[in-house]
Image (cartoon, rainbow, N blue to C red):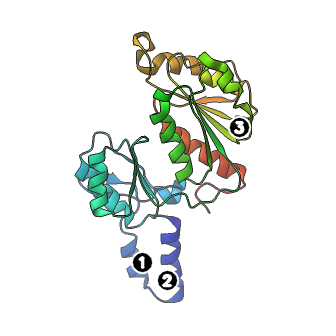
Amino acid sequence: MDREFLRNILGEVAGGGMTPDEALDSLKSLPYEDMGFAKLDQHRNIRGGGAEVVFGQGKTPEQAAAIMERLAETNADLMCTRATPEIFEAIRRRLPGASYDGTARLVTLGGGKRGVAGGAVAVVSAGTADMPVAEEAAVTAEFYGSPVDRVYDVGVAGIHRLLGNAGRIRAADVVIAVAGMEGALASVVAGLVDRPVIAVPTSVGYGSGMGGLAALLAMLNSCSLGVSVMNIDNGFGAGYLAAMINRMAQGGRDGET
């Protein structure tokens, strides 16, 4: 349930077009709605500025589709992360307007309408193998209203590639640094810019990388200032946080247009 939906109900009551009892019936799913296999947080958009995001991994296609369909009744902008093509097809049968990004593994409905003035995000990735996580971050930031500049395959093993794009990275208001292996990219990027850097370790790498744990620990122990660290492969969290920082920097409360 988003702010516009609630505002319309209050306006209808104030204007006499809806009775208080009818309004209460429209709000009966607050603060959550029990679907049996899932309890939908219908109040989240009002509290936090964004509807509940569906985590597709571990859900059947029909479960994910049913949740998205129910959320769509009272929310204009929706997202399902870690979505397979099968999940997308199930959602699209119920919500024909849904879109799918196979690289980012994201299903979206609406989005990109908040129109943050300025507030660009640079998504910087170490290697092509990191692109799925980088794209999850980039598409998420765009969905929540931030323009994105993608600077990919500029890892520290060929640091001239990174330095050659330093101007583009410095032009952003928030930087997301995505890297697996030893995870050094975030520290180097943070040493080049005076902007917040959101570091995202990925599970890309060989045996002793321990599925991204080595990169995570390297980023947590960064000696560069202004680095915050997401969990392994959490591009969505990075993209959302970057967009939130931009909205706040532009003087708006999170969740308001």
Res. 12 mark: 2
Looking at the image, is mark 1 or mark 3 nearer the viewer? 3
Where 164 sits versus 51, above or below? above
* Amino acid at the residue labelled 2: Glu
Residue at the extreme bottom:
16
Q: CA distance from mark 3 to mark 2?
A: 48 Å
x and y percent of residue 88 in the render?
31, 51
x and y percent of residue 164 in the render?
71, 28
Q: CA distance from mark 2 to mark 1?
A: 9 Å
* Amino acid at the residue labelled 3: Arg
Residue 38 shows in this picture = no
Residue at the extreme top:
208
Q: Residue at x 73, y 24 (%)?
A: 191
Q: Residue at x 28, y 53 (%)?
A: 89
Residue named by callout 3? 168
Q: Earlier in the sequence, mark 3 or mark 2?
A: 2
- Residue neighbourhood size for the residue with mark 3, other residues' Cα within 10 Å, grouped as few (<14), some (14–19), many (≥20): few
CB-based contact (under 8 Å), mark 2 and mark 1: yes
Q: CA distance from mark 1 to mark 3?
A: 50 Å
Where 87 sits versus 132, above or below? below
- Residue neighbourhood size for the residue with mark 1, other residues' Cα within 10 Å, grouped as few (<14), some (14–19), many (≥20): some
Residue 192 shows in this picture = yes
Q: Earlier in the sequence, mark 1 or mark 3?
A: 1
- Residue neighbourhood size for the residue with mark 2, other residues' Cα within 10 Å, grouped as few (<14), some (14–19), many (≥20): some
Element at label 1: helix
Q: Quadrant of residue 224?
A: top right
Q: Residue at x 37, y 60 (%)?
A: 71
Residue named by callout 1? 23
